[in-house]
Image (cartoon, rainbow, N blue to C red):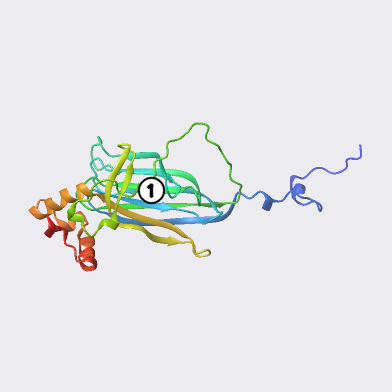
């Protein structure tokens, strides 16, 4: 039959006129080695981390994050984020557990520049806690699938200009106050930002900012805790508010404790 040579699978990649190449169908283009960060979360406040690939890049990430310390009913939550809207994928509470159980999550996600990760931490104790997270993965080289939703999904922007009355104690801090959507109550809550979109990591090659962090507290809860600080029920330094207090007093001449 004219067949004189056994077939070697390696020949698929070696024949002179081949058009099929590994570079045409790559799984990954670069390896993302382990990255880590931690930050304090003040008492009764929230902390978010946004992880966003550069334009035209798709990443596969293995993400771990947790809130340190004994946390009562504190929790962490993984959200997809498009820069305007968030959707919670999963979360972990410590409520109902016995002993020192830390809220934590481990997730595997594929991120793009327009649909990326938001790690959310909620500290419901009156003391400062530590938010930790790390990840590793790959920059993918494959094309993205495109899906169409056949059932309408309600869109709730993650943040909006506040529609609630701003208390007089916050005069001069209006630019720090927003409404943030809370999926646990399916409504917006008025919050005051300690800081917003602070950059902490960038891509050396492109200069693109990969990670941003924000921290905020509900305005009513802040007033409640300030009153407890003033009466000595809470300690200012243990709450984690002290640095922020000193900052706004220096930059804006505002002392919230004096206003109460």
Quarter that holds the C terminus: bottom left
The residue tagged with tag 1: helix, strand or loop?
Answer: strand
**Placement of 80 over or under 169, stated as above or below:** above
Q: Residue 90's x, y, as percent?
A: 39, 39
Of 148 and 162, nearer the camera is 162
Instruction: Name the residue carrying label 1.
Output: 119
Residue toward you, 51 or 106: 51
Q: Position of residue 8 (x, y in %)?
A: 77, 45
Q: Residue furthest top?
A: 151
Q: Position of residue 25 (x, y in %)?
A: 66, 48
| Residue 79, quarter of picture | top left
Q: Is residue 29 above or below residue 92?
A: below
- Image-based side of 258 in relation to 56, left or right: left
Q: Quadrant of the N terminus?
A: top right
Residue nearest the viewer, comparing 100 with 72: 72
Residue drawn at (55%, 37%), measured in percent from left and top? 148
Looking at the rendered structure, the number of numbered marks drawn on it comes to 1
Return the residue found at the far bottom. 250
Residue 97 percent location from the top left of the image? 25, 36
Relative to 205, residue 227 above or below: above
Q: Residue visible at 53% across and 56% down?
A: 55
């Amino acid at each position: 039959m004219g067949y004189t040579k056994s077939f070697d699978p390696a020949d698929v990649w070696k024949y002179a006129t081949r058009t099929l190449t590994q570079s045409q169908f790559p799984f990954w283009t670069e390896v993302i080695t382990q990255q880590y960060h931690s930050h304090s979360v003040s008492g009764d406040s929230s902390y978010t981390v946004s992880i966003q690939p550069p334009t035209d890049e798709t990443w596969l990430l293995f993400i771990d994050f947790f809130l340190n310390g004994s946390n009562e009913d504190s929790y962490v939550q993984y959200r997809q984020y498009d820069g305007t809207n968030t959707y919670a994928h999963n979360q972990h509470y410590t409520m109902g557990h016995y002993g020192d159980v830390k809220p934590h999550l481990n997730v595997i996600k594929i991120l793009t520049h327009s649909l990326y990760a938001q790690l959310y931490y909620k500290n419901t104790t009156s003391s400062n806690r530590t938010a930790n997270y790390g990840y590793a993965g790959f920059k993918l080289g494959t094309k993205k699938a495109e899906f169409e939703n056949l059932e309408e999904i309600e869109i709730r922007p993650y943040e909006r200009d506040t529609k609630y009355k701003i208390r007089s104690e916050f005069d001069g801090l209006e630019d720090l106050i927003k409404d943030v959507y809370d999926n646990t109550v399916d409504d917006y809550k008025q919050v005051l930002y300690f800081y917003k979109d602070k950059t902490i990591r960038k891509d050396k090659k492109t200069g693109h900012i990969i990670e941003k962090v924000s921290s905020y507290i509900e305005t009513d809860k802040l007033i409640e805790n300030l009153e407890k600080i003033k009466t000595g029920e809470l300690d200012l330094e243990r709450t984690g508010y002290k640095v922020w207090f000193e900052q706004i007093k220096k930059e804006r001449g505002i002392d919230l404790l004096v206003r109460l």
